Image (tube, rainbow, N blue to C red):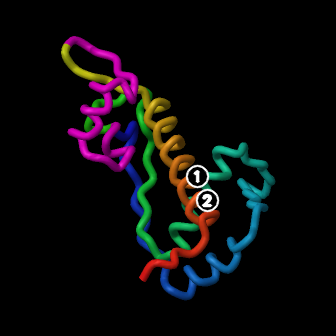
Amino acid sequence: MALIAPRVTAGLPADDARNLARSLQDSNDITVFVDGTVHRLPDQAKDAVVDLLARLSRGETVTVSSVEEMLTTSQAAELAGISHTYLRNMTDRGEIPVEYRGTHRRIRQAAIMAWLEKQKRKEAAANAAEEAAGPDDTP
């Protein structure tokens, strides 16, 4: 799936992870310096950097890699965090658009990212509805 070999970075030591987590808490200002020059990141890059830092702050090992535009079903399933079979079934139902190269299915990376965003919105809506319903009084 990767255009170049992925880079794996081990989780931070506990003290460093706590300090980073403290710094990220409620912070929207991420400043990047490259050779002493300040760079303002576009929102997508900022989100990726904050996500990377948040994972490191939890002591997680992180892998960074690139993703090709057209993915095999296995690559798309890996990116989405679902099984290959489940993804194929979704393409059969038309839930995720698919293109064919001969008999092989190819899925645009953007289609997977859109599906993931839709899932995130569904989850947020379900959580909001659950909170609005109030505490459950059943034992």
Judged left or right of residue 95, residue 105 is left
Q: The C terminus lies in which quarter of the figure?
A: bottom left
State the extent of the magenta-drawn residues as a range: 76-102
Q: Hey, which residue is sitting farthest front in the picture?
A: 138
Which of the pair 79/129 is nearer the observer? 129
Compared to residue 10, the image places residue 100 above or below, namely above
Mark identifier at residue 125: 1
CB atoms of marks 1 and 2 within 8 Å: yes
Residue 22 position in % (x across, y down): 67, 80
Which of the pair 80/128 is nearer the observer? 128
Between the C-alphas of marks 1 and 2, the distance is: 5 Å
The three-letter amino acid code for the residue at tag 1 is Ala
**Counting other residues with Cα less than 10 Å from the Cα at mark 1, is it few (<14), some (14-19), or many (20 or more)?**
few
Which of the pair 88/105 is nearer the observer? 88
Mark identifier at residue 128: 2
Residue 138 position in % (x across, y down): 45, 78
Residue displayed at 77% across by 49% down: 39
Q: Secondary structure at mark 2?
A: helix
Residue 69 position in % (x across, y down): 44, 28
Residue displayed at 80% across by 53% down: 37
